[in-house]
Image: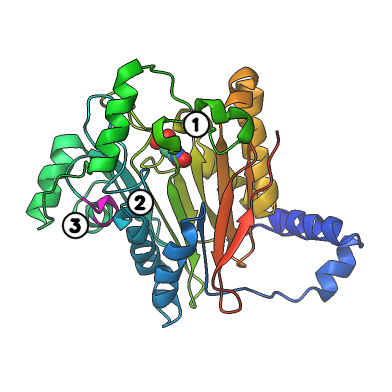
C-alpha cells in the first residue's frame, strides 16, 4: 500500500513536470493507465514485443507474455547475444543466464546453463516447480532435462568462427560499449556486437506486472562468469505495487548497485521511470567514475500506470514499446555521455 507521504511526493513530482501547483494536479489529474503495454531492450525488442502482444491483446497474463516475448530473441540465430547462437565463453562453451518474475513476487532463475535453447522457460519452471529461486550450471541442466527440455549444441558455426577469430589474440578485455561510435575500433571480428541482453517488462489488461531477462552474457567471458541478467534485483525486478525494471550492459556494475531493485525503489518514492533509471545510472558513475566513462549500462523501467522510461551511460541504447496504438515503436534511450 502506498503511504500518504509517497502519494504526496508523487503528486509533487508530477506537478513539477507539468509546471503547476501540486494541489491543482492532485485535484484535477485523471489517473489514466496505459494497459496492456510491453517494453523491451534493444532493436530486437520490436519482434519480441509482438510475440508478447499476442498474449496481452487476448487478455493474457503478463507472465505468459514476457516468457513468449523473450523466447523470440532466444530463438533468433542472427542474434549472437541471447539464446542459441550466443557467443561462447573463452573456452568455447555457450552458457546462458535468464530470470523471470511475476506479479506475486515469485521468481525463478538459471545461470551458466548449457545446451538448452530457452533458458527463460527453464527459469519459469524453477519458479513454479521448485522451492528455490535459482539453479546454476550442471544442476540447472539436470533440472531442465528432467522437465523434458531438449539437449542441443548451442554453438552455431558463425559464433564458433567469431570465437576462433577472437582466440587468435585472446585479449581478455571485456568491452561493452561497441554500439557507441567512438569505440568502434574495438569491434569484434566481423563487426559483431559482444553484448545485448533482452529485458522485457509487461503490464497486462488486469493491471498486473511481470518481467523477464535472458542473455548469453559477455562474449568470450571467463568460464563460470555470471552477470546481472539472472540475478533478481540486479538484471530484473518487479514489484506489482510499483513497477518493474531491467538492465543491459556490463553486469558487474549493475550487480554492484543492485540496479533494477534500485530503480523500482526509486519509483516507489515517486520518481518517474526515466528519472529512476537516470538516478541508477548516476549511482554507477558515482561509485566508479573512471570505469563508467568506458562502458555501457542501460536501465529500462515501467510503472503501474503504464508509464515507461530509460537511461543509459552511453549513446546507442534503444528500446521497443508496444501498445494498442503503436505496435512497433523503437525509442532511442537518453544517455549521460
Ligand atoms: C551481462 N548484462 O552478462 C549482461 C550482458 C548484457 O547487454 O546485457 N549485454 O553482464
Is residue 101 shown above or below 218?
Answer: below
Q: Which residues are magenta?
A: 117-121
Say which residue label 2 marks.
78
The reply to whether discs 1 and 2 touch (Cβ–Cβ < 8 Å) is: no
* Between 289 and 334, the one nearer to me in the picture: 334
Q: Is residue 242 visible?
A: no
Give me the residue at 49% from left, 78% from top: 205
The reply to whether discs 3 and 1 touch (Cβ–Cβ < 8 Å) is: no
* Structural distance between the alpha carbons of marks 1 and 2: 19 Å
Q: Secondary structure at mark 1?
A: loop
Left or right of residue 51: residue 268 = right
Q: Split into 4 quadrants, where in the image is the C terminus?
A: top right
| Predominant SS along the magenta part | helix
Callout 2 crowding tier (Cα within 10 Å): few <14, some 14–19, many ≥20: few
First in sequence, mark 1 or 2: give its number.
2
Say which residue label 1 marks.
176
Amino acid at each position: 500500500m502506498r503511504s500518504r507521504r509517497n502519494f504526496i511526493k508523487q503528486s509533487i513530482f508530477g506537478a513539477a513536470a507539468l509546471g503547476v501547483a501540486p494541489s491543482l494536479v492532485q485535484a484535477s489529474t485523471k489517473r489514466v493507465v496505459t494497459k496492456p503495454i510491453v517494453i523491451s531492450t534493444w532493436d530486437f525488442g520490436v519482434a519480441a514485443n509482438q510475440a508478447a502482444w499476442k498474449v496481452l491483446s487476448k487478455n493474457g497474463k503478463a507472465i505468459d507474455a514476457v516468457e513468449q516475448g523473450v523466447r523470440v530473441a532466444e530463438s533468433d540465430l542472427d542474434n549472437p547475444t541471447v539464446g542459441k547462437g550466443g557467443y561462447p565463453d573463452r573456452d568455447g562453451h555457450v552458457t546462458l543466464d535468464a530470470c523471470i518474475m511475476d506479479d506475486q513476487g515469485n521468481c525463478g532463475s538459471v545461470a551458466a546453463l548449457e545446451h538448452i535453447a530457452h533458458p527463460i522457460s527453464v527459469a519459469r519452471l524453477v519458479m513454479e516447480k521448485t522451492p528455490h529461486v535459482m539453479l546454476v550450471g550442471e544442476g540447472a541442466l539436470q533440472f531442465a532435462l528432467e522437465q523434458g527440455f531438449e539437449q542441443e549444441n548451442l554453438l552455431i558455426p558463425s559464433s564458433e568462427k567469431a570465437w576462433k577469430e577472437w582466440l587468435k589474440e585472446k585479449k581478455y578485455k571485456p568491452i561493452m560499449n561497441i554500439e557507441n561510435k567512438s569505440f568502434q575500433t574495438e569491434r569484434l571480428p566481423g563487426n559483431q556486437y559482444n553484448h545485448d541482453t533482452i529485458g522485457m517488462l509487461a503490464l497486462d489488461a488486469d493491471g498486473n506486472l511481470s518481467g523477464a531477462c535472458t542473455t548469453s552474457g559477455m562474449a568470450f567471458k571467463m568460464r563460470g562468469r555470471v552477470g546481472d541478467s539472472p540475478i533478481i534485483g540486479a538484471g530484473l525486478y518487479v514489484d506489482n505495487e510499483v513497477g518493474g525494471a531491467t538492465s543491459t550492459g556490463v553486469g558487474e556494475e549493475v550487480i554492484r548497485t543492485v540496479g533494477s531493485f534500485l530503480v523500482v525503489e526509486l519509483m516507489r518514492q515517486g520518481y518517474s521511470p526515466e528519472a529512476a533509471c537516470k538516478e541508477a545510472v548516476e549511482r554507477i558513475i558515482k561509485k566508479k567514475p573512471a570505469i563508467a566513462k568506458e562502458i555501457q549500462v542501460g536501465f529500462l523501467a515501467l510503472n503501474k500506470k503504464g508509464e515507461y522510461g530509460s537511461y543509459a551511460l552511453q549513446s546507442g541504447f534503444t528500446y521497443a514499446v508496444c501498445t494498442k496504438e503503436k505496435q512497433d515503436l523503437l525509442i532511442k534511450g537518453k544517455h549521460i555521455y
